[in-house]
Image (cartoon, rainbow, N blue to C red):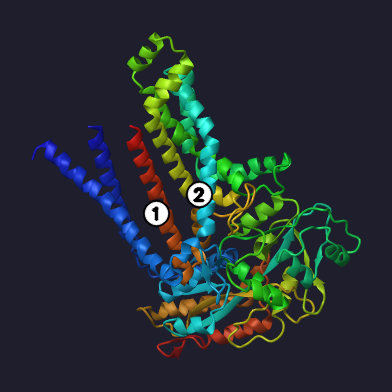
Amino acid sequence: MKTIISVVLLAVLFSSCQNSGKKTEKSSGEKVSLTAAGATFPLPYYNLVFKNYSEAKGTQVTYGGIGSGGGIRSLTDKVVDFGATDAYLEDKQLAEMPAPVVHIPTCLGAVVIAYNLPGVDELKLSNELLEKIFLGEITKWNDPKIVANNPGVQFPGKDIIFVHRSDGSGTTHIFSDYMTKISTKWAEKVGTGKSLNWPVGMGAKGNPGVVGTLSQTEGAIGYVGSEFAFAQKIQMAKVQNSQGEYVLPTIASVSAAAKGNIPDDTRIMLTNSSDAESYPISGFTWIILYKEQAYNGRSLAQAEETVKLLDWLVGPEAQAEAANVNYAPLTEDAAAKAKAILRTITYDGKPILN
Amino acid sequence: MNSDKITKIVLFSVSFIILILAGGMVFSLVGGAIPSFKTFGFGFITSAQWDPTEGKEQYGALPFIAGTLITSLGALIISFPLSFATSLFLGEYYRNTRVAKVLGTMVDLLAGIPSIVYGLWGFYVLRPFLISIGFDNQGFGVFTSSLVLAIMIIPYATSLSNEIISMVPNDLKEAAYSLGSTRYEVIRYVTVPAARSGIFAGYILAFGRALGETMAVTMLIGNANRIPDSLFSTGNTMASVIANQFGEADGLKLSALISIGLLLFVITGIVNGIGKLIIKKMS
């Protein structure tokens, strides 16, 4: 008897599994609702502004933080209204998309160098030190090179423990892009990417994992996304920018990285910016969408709402919210370029915004 | 139709579903693994190079295979004295007593704790403890992972051995006692030999569980993609690298991760196969 009951239970379990997949069909109301997915880095910002938007305009926006790679895949498969990514699409990737895609920068973030050394309140890291520490050539905190760069600071003789991301991440991409720009040795040995072949150190999952490991381990150093680091009270190092200044990551110094020449399609890595006030490991995060919005049977209303939302997102009202959730707002120049791009988006060949 | 026939049909169809499920998994794993095996051949298994950087992509699974086997073996070795002693205590010395019931329930409870909780405990309690007693200066690595894994697999090894040990026929034991054996001698020469295939099966089950454990290990092993060179060295396991990297993986890397999944499947299969063979020889 027992066996029969468990057999029946199993059968019920399986059939319920199969059914649950079919219930996801959407009921189409009068209101347009938008679906988007992509980078986790801007997730808190998007959550906040999309909520504000739906309260003000009544348009529901669902954003899934599934990672930049997932955002690009979702847009390729045309299952979202727009995607989001921390790394812009290379020319080769753009060519592989089923239709032309445009990039809209939405805010700036940075990668901070965080460390855990009780008693060391200020740490200045030159480009040479960054290279040597992260390639494992300097292994002790009281190394003469570190001491010489930070006069007056007492360093303990602890081992340097480097904590990096164990998962693929846009944060790693920005960090390694900067390292590649400042160090030829890094460029040769490691290179740029969302996940890397690390010469030293240990991995932890996500920003919370890295910060958790850092705060638990004296002598640890690692890199953390600014949106997370600013919210936590952790020790952050000053990094030397291209003008030789040591700059602490702040909303203002991150925003300053976007001063200077930005190409019209906004596809640029802002690391190692030439601005003297800029924090050098900064970058845009983008929303990506199709230039021609009439695809897959999307209605004009759907397309209009998509573009209107994005136009509002790069506008002053939404940008003012960025700093509240630890993101740096777009510079005027970048916002103007984003608006210009939005005006090239069409539905059946006709521009949507004027 | 009589109830016998209905039972037969239901049983057949349900077991067939499981067969299809397992077959489907193998099929999709093999399909996903083909590109990476085409690119790297069997070097994929023997290479220790894991470089996801664009332009010089190179994937080898050896560091992860090594990490998985070392942590799981370590866990088995650490857990053996604990679980073997507990199962003798429960199944032989204090069989059917209140103490045994309470202790048995506690052991089973260990199996019900989610692995993330073990991971957190390892991260916030065990690791600082290991650092404070001077075992290591950062506390991540193979040893810490094995220690936590050992605790996680204790219930699997204990429950089965305990069950088998308490099932050893009393006639056998009474015969030994009547010949003047001490309690130790009975256990040594009667109980354990009679129960050994079951005890062994318990440890195979526990080892299989350790091979596939993901969350707790990810939090403690340090996720460094290299072959561990000492007990306290950081490393990575097959399950852990899949969990960490799957989200942002595409192309060749995705295929490499699926191949690791396939290898893990195969290794678990081999372990179970060897286990069954040994059990067959023993009994």
Q: Which residue is found at the position 32% from the left and 37% from the top?
A: B280
Q: Amino acid at mark 2?
A: Leu
Tell me, for residue B266, which label it has, or none.
1
Q: Residues within 10 Å of mark 2 (few under 14, many from 20)?
A: some
Q: Which residue is found at the position 64% from the left and 41% from the top?
A: B126
Tell me, for residue B152, which label it has, or none.
none
Q: Is residue A160 above or below residue B187?
A: below
Relative side of B99 to A230, left or right:
left
Q: Quadrant of residue A116?
A: bottom right
Residues beneath discs 1 and 2 located on the same chain: yes
User: Which chain letter matches label 2?
Assistant: B
Instruction: Please indicate, yes or no, whether residue A106 appears anywhere in the rendered image.
Output: yes
Q: Quadrant of residue A56?
A: bottom right
Quarter in which the N terminus of chain A is drawn: top left
User: Which chain letter matches label 1?
Assistant: B
Q: Is residue B157 above or below residue A32?
A: above
Residue extending furthest toward the bottom? A349
Residue A196 image position (x, y, % from top left): 60, 67
Q: Is disc 1 placed on a helix, strand or loop? A: helix
Q: Residues within 10 Å of mark 1 (few under 14, many from 20)?
A: few
Instruction: Please indicate, yes or no, whether residue A36 appears anywhere in the rendered image.
Output: no
Q: Quadrant of residue B170?
A: top left
Disc 1 or 2, which lies upstream in sequence?
2
Tell me, for residue B69, which label it has, or none.
2
Residue A174 image position (x, y, % from top left): 64, 72
Q: Nearer the viewer, residue A141 or A1?
A: A141
Q: Nearer the viewer, residue A266 or B280?
A: B280
